């Protein structure tokens, strides 16, 4: 699927053909590397890269391929949630009186 997407992008050269390398297994997915040649590198690569990423995202959605979102933890400035809330509310009320 990724090779087809790369070949469908403007400016991607058909030869040498795009390649995909399996780089590693991650906790929440796999790390793949898609390599391709473009016909006119002097014109930059960012628009080609963007086109491929957008097409891949659309193709993944159409084919039921989910991109995992890594878990994130958010820690407040204080270990005491009430103290953090009081600080934020106090700052907000001071901002209103200026």
Image (cartoon, rainbow, N blue to C red):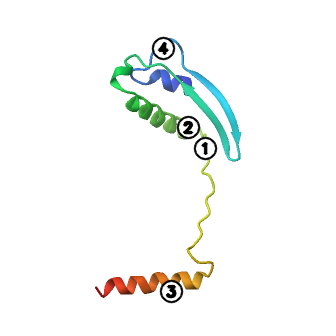
Which residue appears at 56% of the width and 85% of the height? 83
Look at the numbered disc 1 and give the secondary structure of its residue: loop
Q: What is the distance, in whole Å, between disc 4 and disc 3 at their CAs? A: 61 Å
- Which mark is nearer the camera, 2 or 4? 4
**For the residue carrying disc 1, how many other residues have a C-alpha within 10 Å: few (<14), some (14-19), or many (20+)?**
few
Q: What is the distance, in whole Å, between disc 2 and disc 1 at their CAs? A: 7 Å
Which residue appears at 40% of the width and 32% of the height? 46
Asked where in the image residue 21 lies, by quadrant, the reply is top right
Residue 79 is left or right of residue 13, and the answer is right
Quadrant (top left, top right, bottom left, bottom right) of the C terminus: bottom left
Residue 58 is left or right of residue 82, and the answer is left
Q: What is the distance, in whole Å, between disc 4 and disc 1 at their CAs? A: 28 Å
Of pointers 4 and 3, the one earlier in the residue sequence: 4
| 5 vs 62: above or below | above
| 64 vs 2: above or below | below
Q: x%, y% of residue 14?
A: 48, 14
Which one is in front, 79 or 34? 79
Which residue appears at 35% of the width and 21% of the height? 42
* Whether label 2 touches label 1, CB < 8 Å: yes
Q: x%, y% of residue 94?
A: 36, 86
Q: Which residue is mark 4?
A: 14
* Whether label 1 touches label 3, CB < 8 Å: no
């Amino acid at each position: 699927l990724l090779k087809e997407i790369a070949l469908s992008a403007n400016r991607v050269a058909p030869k040498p053909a795009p390649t995909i390398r399996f780089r590693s297994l991650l906790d929440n997915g796999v790390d793949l590397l898609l390599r391709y040649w473009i016909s006119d590198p002097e014109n930059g690569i960012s628009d080609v890269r963007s086109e491929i990423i957008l097409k891949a995202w659309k193709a993944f959605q159409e084919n039921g391929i989910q991109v995992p979102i890594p878990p994130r933890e958010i820690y407040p400035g204080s270990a005491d949630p009430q103290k953090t809330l009081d600080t934020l509310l106090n700052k907000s009320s001071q901002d209103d009186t200026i």
